[in-house]
Image (cartoon, grey):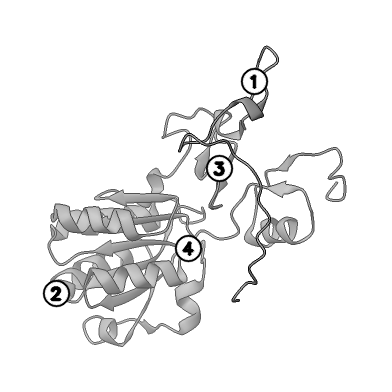
Amino acid sequence: MLKLDEYIDLIVPRGSNEFVRYIMDNTRISVMGHADGICHVYVDGDTDVDMAVNVAVDSKCQYPAVCNAMETLLVDEAIAAAFLGKVRDALLERNVEIRGCDKTADIIECKPATEEDWSTEYLDYILSIRVVNGIDEAIEHINKYGSGHTDAIVTQDKDKASMFSSLVDSGDVFVNCSTRFSDGFRYGLGAEVGISTNKIHARGPVGLEGLLIYKWHLVGDGHIVADYAGVDGKKFKHSKIDKESSL
């Protein structure tokens, strides 16, 4: 099927990371899909701790084996001491294995996180935690290690919420809510046909309408382009440029 590009316009693969990546790497047919779901929650220093704990736990534990579950928790160092202990207790109640950076390990007991952890989609009760120096470092981390799927910020600062929403390069960016809301049915799109982390056309959860493309119809009465002037009032024309390029 992957070789039938003359007959098939689009493939929407649903399945494991390995399956989707194989499809993307082995066909000339357009593919609407996502290979990874490395989602983040960033807990800002200006936030309600209890709300942040609830959002983080739901993002990780409500259903960990799906692409919109959180895999990395980023915590502003300004709130780390007050937040990490509470979220650790809530996660351990649900048997979540915690892997943390050095700063995290200074505050709570956890396994050491490696560089590989930041780019790993666990799809399991495993979570990596990193303490960052504010929102700029959080955004930088997400855009470096994330997969463009879903990322969330928990904050009471509207300016930071707006900044995060604008600068995080993902199909779904949330403020003060769980990453698990990233779903076509919950968006009101009907049955979710697929999820796209592509940078053009449909992005994020996609329903049937999101599969549609454009087809332009123009009806004239003998109109020709030569009759129409350009913006400056002059008619368009091609002119040969004799000057040699300086490049």
Amino acid type, label 3? His
Q: Are marks 4 and 1 in contact (CB under 8 Å)?
A: no
Q: Which residue is mark 2?
A: 78
Q: Are marks 3 and 4 in contact (CB under 8 Å)?
A: no
Q: Which residue is mark 4?
A: 38
Residue 215, position in %: x, y? Answer: 65, 27
Indicate the secondary structure of the residue bearing disc 3: loop
Indicate the secondary structure of the residue bearing disc 2: loop
Q: Splitting the image into 4 quarters, where does residue 111 fall?
A: bottom left
Relative to 236, say whether 165 is above or below.
Answer: below
Q: CA distance from mark 3 to mark 4?
A: 21 Å
Sequence-wise, the earlier of marks 2 and 3 is 2
Seen as rendered, the residue at the extreme front is 242
Could you classify mark 2 by the number of other residues whose Cα lies within 10 Å: few (under 14), some (14-19), or many (20 or more)?
some
Residue 19, position in %: x, y? Answer: 70, 57
Q: CA distance from mark 2 to mark 1?
A: 59 Å
